[in-house]
Amino acid sequence: MVHVQWSGMDRQQIEAHGLTIEEVERQLALLRSGVSPAELVRPCTPGDGILVLDADTRQQMIDRFNRVRSRYRILRFVPAAGAATRMWRDLYAIRDTLRSGQTLDAVLREKMQRFFHNLHRFAFYEALDRVIRRRGERLSDLLESHAYARILDYLLEPGGLGYGDMPKGLVPFHRYPDRPRTAAEEHLVEATVHACGSVPTAVVHFVTRADHALRFRSFLDQVKHRYETTCRIHLEWSIQSPSTDTVAIDGAGRIVRDANGRILFRPGGHGALLSNLNRLDADLVFVKNIDNVAMDAYKPATFEAFGMLGGVIITVREAITALLQRVTAGTPIDMWLPDAEVLLRRYFFTDMDTVCARVPDRDPRQAILRFFDRPLRVCGMVRNVGEPGGGPFWVRMPNGEVLPQIVESAQVDLDHPKYREIWNGATHFNPVVMVLAMRDGRGRPYDLFRFSEPEMAFITEKYFRGQPIRALEHPGLWNGGMAYWRTIFVEIPRAAFNPVKTVFDLLRPEHQQTP
C-alpha cells in the first residue's frame, strides 16, 4: 500500500467523492506497480467454451423463452454514460486542420470527401439544415462554397447541434419515413418486443453521466409514447457514481492534479457500473451497449439472439436450482450426480473431477455448491471478423482456476509470442449481448462484488493538459467485474452486432436501408 502525505483539502475532496484514503492509496499502488496481464490458456472455441446450437435447438430455446418469460421480471440494462467523442474524432481533426490552414493528409482528405459526399444520408441532416437556417445561412450554400469547417462547427459545437458533447444515445442514428430515431429510442423498440408479450410493461434502465441525466430523461419521457404500441415502457435511471472515479499518475509516479492543486479524478470505466448493476431489481437482465442497434428491418437477428440466450439461461438456471435443492436436501449422491455431470459437460465444458479438485477432500456436495451457487451469465458471441474489442478465452485466474473470461486486448501482453499466438487464435468476438441471472434459487440477490476480481483492473494511457498520464479503470463490467460468475458463451448471428463507433459506421446498410 502507498502512503501519501494528504493535505486537508485532499481529504475533503476524497471524502466528497465518496472515497476513502485507503482506496485512493490502493489505486496509486496499482498504478505504480502495474497490473498483471491476463494469463491466457487458450481461446474459447466451438465445443471448448463456446456453445453452438443447431437450428432445432435454437428454436427450442427461443420457444421456451417466449413460453415462460412472463414468470420473470425482465429488465434491459443499457450503459449510456459515455459522450460520443470517439464518434466525431475524425471530424474534429478535419475541422481543426482546415481552421489552421494546414493541408489535410491523404487519410483525412478521403474521410472529409466521404463525409460531405454522404452528408444527406445521415439521419441528422435535416436537423443540421434547420439549425444553420436559424442562424441565417443555408447548408447548400456552405457546401457549394466548401465551407466545411463552418459546417462542422454547426454540427459539433454548442452554438449549433452540439453533437460533440452529446450523449451517444441521443444522436439521431436512423432515418425513418416519419422521423429520425436515436440510439436510445431503438433500445425502447427492442425492449417492447423481447420483454413484453404477455407482460404488460417493458423495463429499460439507462446509466448516464450526471450532467447528461436531465437531457436523457426529458427526451425519452417525451418520445416513449411513440413506442408503447404493444405494452407500456417503464424507464429507470442511475448515474455513474463519483465514488467509482479513479486517480491517475504522471511520468514520475506522482498523483495528477489540476491547475488549482486538486486531485484529478477520472471516470473509472464501464467496470464502475457494477454498483449500478448490483442495485437492480430483476430476475433476468438483458445487457446491450447503447450504440449496438440497427434499423427495424435488421432487428430480427437481435430478437433471435436474445430469445436464444434467454432460453438458455432459463433452462440452465432452473436445472441448477433443482440440482442445488437435491444437494442441500441430503439426497443420495448417486441420484443427482449423473444430472450434475450432464450439466457441467453440456454448458460449462468441465466435469466433476475438475470441479471436485477445488474443494477439501474432493467432496462432491461442497464442489457442486461452490460451483453453482453464484450469479449466471449467458453471453452471445459472434464470429471474429476483425472488429476491435474483446473476445472469449480460457484464463488462469489469480486463485489458480482456469475459467472462461471475456478478455480485452489491453489485458494481454501481446509482445509475448505465446499470448500473441493465443490471442490471434480467437474464433469469436464479444458484441456485449448478454443475459444475466443475479438471484439464487430462492430469489435472493447475490452481492455481485463477491464475484469480481480486483486484480483484473485496466491501466490506460491518457493525456491531461498535453502531458501523458497513466489512468486506472476498474475491472471491466463483463471482464474482471464478472470474473467469478458462471459463464456460458453461445454463438449468435453476426447480424446481431451493429455497433456505431465512428460516424462513418452510420453509412453501413443496417443503419441506412431495408435488406
Image (tube, helix red, strand yellow):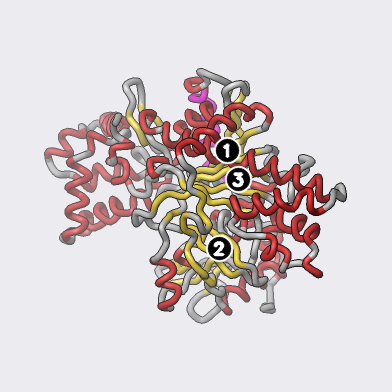
| Mark nearer the viewer, 3 or 1 | 1
Q: Quadrant of the N terminus?
A: bottom right
Q: Quadrant of residue 248?
A: bottom right
The amino acid at mark 2 is: Glu
Query: Residue 363 location in percent, x, y?
Result: 80, 63
Disc nearer the start of the sequence (3/1): 3
Residue 86 versus residue 185 in the image, above or below: below
* Viewer-side residue, 414 vs 101: 414
The amino acid at mark 3 is: Ile
Circle 1 residues within 10 Å: few <14, some 14–19, many ≥20: many
| Residue hosting label 2 | 473
* Viewer-side residue, 125 vs 295: 295
* Viewer-side residue, 222 vs 379: 379
| Residue hosting label 3 | 239
Q: Residue at x 29, y 53 (%)?
A: 90
Span of residues in magenta? 210-224
Most frequent secondary structure within the magenta stretch: helix
Indicate left or right for 416 with 317 as reference: left
What is the distance, in whole Å, between disc 2 and disc 3 at their CAs? 17 Å
| Residue hosting label 1 | 310
Circle 3 residues within 10 Å: few <14, some 14–19, many ≥20: some
Q: Is residue 8 visible?
A: yes
The amino acid at mark 1 is: Gly
Q: Quadrant of the C terminus?
A: top left
Secondary structure category for the residue under label 2:
strand
